[in-house]
Amino acid sequence: MDAFRRIAGIVRREAGIHLPDTKLSLVFSRLVRRVAETGAGSFERYGDLVSSPAGAEELRRMVEALTTNYTFFFREPHHFRHFETEVLPELAQRARAGGRVRIWSAGCSTGQETYSAAMSLLRTVPDASALDIRILATDIDRNVLRAASHGRYDETAFADVAACDRARFFQPAPEGLLEARPELRALIRFRELNLLAPWPMRGLFDVVFFRNVAIYFDQGVREAVWLRMADQIHPDGWLYAGHSERVTGAAAERLAHLATTTYRRLA
């Protein structure tokens, strides 16, 4: 238990992920391979390794091993309906007048959320590629970012994607996979980002998808990240949260709750 709590403390400090005692079995099952491959021999010595300067790279691998990556296309479809009908028409008008539009998929995992947003964008704004509209997709896990940047998925991933969208936005790839077409991928930039570290983005976002990530933080970390998110959104911009998440703390004074897990930045 002491080794687990030490590792849990390291993960919280590095990535904000809260690991209560009930996660002991899950943590050990995910790390047992790392313990073996590093030659640490025990979880106690593994804790020593990731706490040392020499273990910086292994620390990143440990965090990646403990990150939960569960996602699918058009998850929580009410967000995408709202995005298409209530948000994108106004943003498209601004972009066609020469304005800049930025969308952020924070905690993008293997990319399904990001590509869903890009499909919604192209369905609603067919000329988006010719406008200054871009989607930033970030995650702490380098492995899922690589998968997302390739944009390749098997047939089972498309259960919630309309056949017309699958044909329009994806093309056959090796090994029976389907790959995002260039027009979809051109809208997106995938970047590594730890939400607890400094954020390099200089501009503000018009829309942020930050869904089913904050649930892995404890309340203090969660509210701090909500506040940073609020400050990163344009006045009158939008934030979509996960189905079991609610914005609380100081951020609640800056983000008005207007629909189911849908918030708007107060001007």
Image (tube, helix red, strand yellow):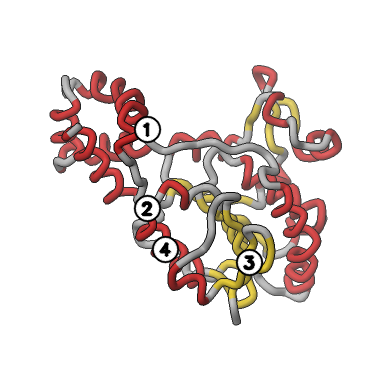
Is label 2 in a helix, a strand or a loop? loop
For label 1, the crowd category at 10 Å Cα-Cα, with few meaning under 14, some 14 to 19 and many 20 or more, is some
Of the two numbered discs 4 and 3 in the rendering, the one whose residue sits closer to the viewer: 4
Whole-angstrom CA distance, mark 2 to mark 4, is 9 Å
Please, is residue 39 above or below residue 257 in the view?
above
Residue for point 48% across, 72% down: 231
- Residue at point 27%, 41% (across, down): 8
Question: Looking at the image, which is closer to me, 148 or 109?
Answer: 109
Q: Return the mark for residue 65.
A: 1
Q: Which residue is at a point 77% across and 65% down the rendered structure image?
A: 86
Could you classify mark 3 by the number of other residues whose Cα lies within 10 Å: few (under 14), some (14-19), or many (20 or more)?
many
Q: Given the image, on which type of amino acid does mark 4 rest?
A: Glu
Q: Is residue 49 left or right of residue 68?
A: left
Query: How far apart are labels 2 and 3 at the CA level?
Result: 24 Å
Precedes in sequence: disc 1 or disc 3: 1
Task: Determine the image quadrant of residue 7.
Answer: top left
Kindly check if marks 4 and 3 are in contact, taking CB atoms under 8 A apart as contact: no
Say which amino acid is labelled 1.
Ala
Residue where numbered disc 4 is placed: 223
Mark 2 and mark 1 in contact (Cβ < 8 Å)?
no
Q: Residues within 10 Å of mark 4 (few under 14, many from 20)?
A: many
